[in-house]
Image: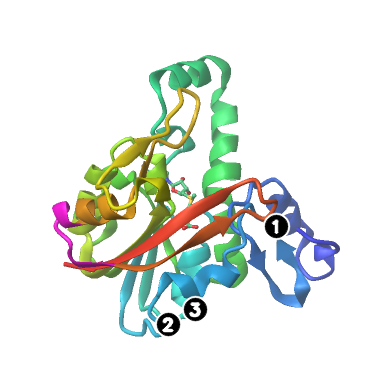
Amino acid sequence: MTTDPERFYPRELVERARRINWYHTFHLDHGVEIEGQFDLTPMVPRYGLPDDLAGKTVLDVGASNGFFSFEFERRGADRVVAVDLPTFEAHDSSPALRAERDATLSDEDLARNDESDLHGGFFLLKELFESKVEHVGCNIYDLGPDKVGGRYDVVFCGSLLIHLTDPLRALMRLRTVTKERCIVATVHEPALGDATDMRFIGVWNGAAWWKPSIACLMEMMRCAGFKDVRRHDDFELVSRHGDHVDPTVVIHATV
Ligand SMILES: C[S@@+](CC[C@H](N)C(=O)[O-])C[C@H]1O[C@@H](n2cnc3c(N)ncnc32)[C@H](O)[C@@H]1O
């Protein structure tokens, strides 16, 4: 957090916020800022989110700290459900990384990681914003109407597919919970041009696996059962410190 948040927010909340690894940056009242890895506020218009979500239900898959979930609520959605992994350890990891973590991390370490890297930021902000956004711990591979209480008018999945060994299977699961429109934003590989190819970028101790071409991503979405698949926009997502520059594409589709 930036200087002097204690002047405006309870000390307990500020101390909790300092223990969290924030992915998203949040601009709070009184000029107080939560400094996350990415500041998406200036990028929001590029995603083509509906301005008015009154009467709509929205599912935000891979919500992290909930930047988009809270934005959907602000746009008037009737119901917003944020989905993220039930535990940090449920990430798609290589067997070697899993074994290493099993050998070195205690149950307390794992619980602390869940709080600092997975759910803590979302729940802190839910409290701060007095938000009604619901939270469900569910792997994208397990998504289905039974897991998240039905199908949703709008399903959003931002910057998640790169973390999966099987993005096509994940898109198929997104299809099962989409009632009207699905918006997928993800890192792509511009060098692949129009070929329907994906580049393998995985390493044994990493958390990123594939970078598809835009054509490949669109074709996978069609295979997953989506219709009217169209490229809405593409841009570079640059982290606050410039150490990540991710070519990102936003695809809109219907069912
Ligand atoms: C890079 S963040 C993206 C946050 C946000 N959606 C956005 O667009 O800014 C990716 C999120 O996806 C979640 N994630 C990774 N693998 C997942 C999986 N298999 N199922 C559900 N969520 C997953 C991570 O825990 C993380 O919160």
Residue drawn at x 44%, y 73% is 72
Residue at which label 2 appears: 76
Q: Which mark is residue 4?
A: none
Distance from label 3 to label 2 (Cα)? 5 Å
- 165 in the magenta segment: no
Quarter of the view holding residue 86: top left
Which circle, 1 or 3, is nearer the viewer?
Answer: 1
Spot occupied by residue 184 in the image (x, y as percentages of width and height): 34, 60
Residue at (17% x, 61% y) in the render: 226
The residue tagged 3 is 74
Q: Amino acid at mark 1?
A: Glu
User: Pointers 3 and 2 in contact (CB under 8 A)?
Assistant: yes
Quadrant of the snapshot with the C terminus: bottom left
According to the image, what is the colour scheme of the structure?
rainbow
Can residue 142 be seen in the rendering of this structure?
no
- Between marks 1 and 2, how big is the CA–CA gap? 26 Å
Q: Amino acid at mark 2?
A: Gly
Disc 3 marks a residue whose amino acid type is Arg
Residue drawn at 41 percent across, 41 percent down: 163
Q: Of helix, strand and loop, which one carries label 1?
A: loop
What segment is highlighted magenta in the picture? 222-230
Q: Nearer the viewer, mark 1 or mark 2?
A: 1
- Graded by Cα atoms within 10 Å as few (under 14), some (14 to 19) or many (20 or more), the crowding at tag 1 reads some
Within the image, what quadrant is residue 56 found in? bottom left
Q: Residues within 10 Å of mark 3 (few under 14, many from 20)?
A: some
Give the residue displayed 38% in from the left and 63% down from the top: 250
Location of residue 124 with respect to 101 vertically, above or below: below
- For the residue pair 155 and 147, the one nearer the viewer reads as 155
